[in-house]
Image (cartoon, rainbow, N blue to C red):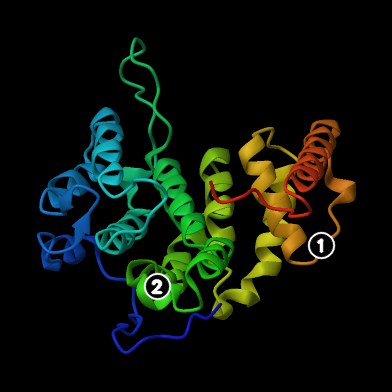
Amino acid sequence: MTDAPSQTDAALPDEFPHHQTLLEETDWASPATPCGTGESLPTALARLLDHDPGTRAAAAVTALGAVTHQNSIYEATVPVALYVAAILNHPATETGADGQNAERAPHRPTRAVLLDWLGNTAYDANDENVAAGERLCGKEFLDDYQEMHAFRHLRPVLYSAVQPLLGHDDAEVRAAAVIAGIPLVEHPALAVHRGELADRARNLLATSTDRYQRDRVFDALKAWGHDTSGLENADDRSVRELRTRRIAERTSWAGGYAEEPPF
C-alpha cells in the first residue's frame, strides 16, 4: 500500500481555509456525487450554520447525505470534508439542543454530528480499506481511485481541525473527536499525535458504553501496539470471544481462509 502524492495532488494549505471562502470559491457544479454533481451543496452546507438547531440537523442530512453512499469517496467528498472541518469550531455548531421550546426533542450538538460524518468518511478511506482494495484490484488501487487518494492526502489538514476538540467540555463532542481522529492519524505525518490520541482513547473507554466507539478504540490501541487486556469490561470480552468463534467458524467453512469470501 502506498500513499505517495501524485502529480495532481494540490499542496496542503499553510492555513486552514475560511469556510466562506470554501463555499464561494469552490466550483460545486463540477465535482461528482452519487447522484450527479454538487451544484446544490452550497445552499445545504450554508444551513449547517443556521441559528436554528432543527435547520442545522436537517442540513446535515441533506448536505452530508448527498456525498455519502455505499462507503465510497466521491469527487465532492473532498470539498465537503474541507468545509465541515472549517466550521467545526464555529460558534453555530457548538450546540444542538433547543432550549427555547421544551416540547421539541433535543438535537445532538451539530459539532458532534459533523465529527461523526468526518470520522465515518475517514474510516471509509482508511488503511484497512486501501489494503482490501489493493488485494482485489492490485497495487494501482489508489492511483485509479483518485477521490480516495485526494481525501487521504488531506488528513493532516482535517486533523488540525479535529484536534482542538479532543478535550472539549461536551462529552459527545469529545468522544466524536476521538473517534474521528483515529483514522486520520494513520497518515504518516500524524504519527507523532498517536500517543496523545491513545490517552484520550483510554479515557473514553472509562466513560463510554457505546459499542461502536469502544470497538474503534480497541482496534486503534491494538494497531498502535498497546496492551488492552486490562481495559476490557465483561461486555468487551463477550464480544471479543464471539468474534473469535465466528472467525474460527468462517475459517473452517472456507477451507482455511480467515476472511469471508468476496460474495
Q: Residue beneath label 1, please? A: 226
Identity of the residue drawn at 88% across and 49% down:
229
Return the disc, 2 or 1, that comes first in the chain's sequence: 2
Secondary-structure class at tag 2: helix
- Residue 172, image x and y in percent? 54, 39
Asked whether, in this view, residue 69 is left or right of residue 181, the answer is: left
Asked whether, in this view, residue 75 is left or right of residue 160, the answer is: left
Identity of the residue drawn at 77% across and 59% down:
222
- Residue 230, image x and y in percent? 90, 48
> Which residue is at the far right?
230
Q: Quadrant of residue 92?
A: top left
- Residue 188, image x and y in percent? 58, 79
Mark 2, mark 1: which one is toward the viewer?
2
**Res 50 label:** none
> Which residue is at the far top?
103
Q: Are marks 2 and 1 in contact (CB under 8 Å)?
A: no
Q: Quadrant of residue 128?
A: bottom right
Q: Residue beneath label 2, please? A: 149
> Which amino acid type is shown beneath numbered disc 1?
His
Check the picture and name the quadrant holding the N terminus.
Answer: bottom right
> Which amino acid type is shown beneath numbered disc 2?
His
Compared to residue 102, the image places residue 197 above or below, namely below
Compared to residue 18, the image places residue 93 above or below, namely above
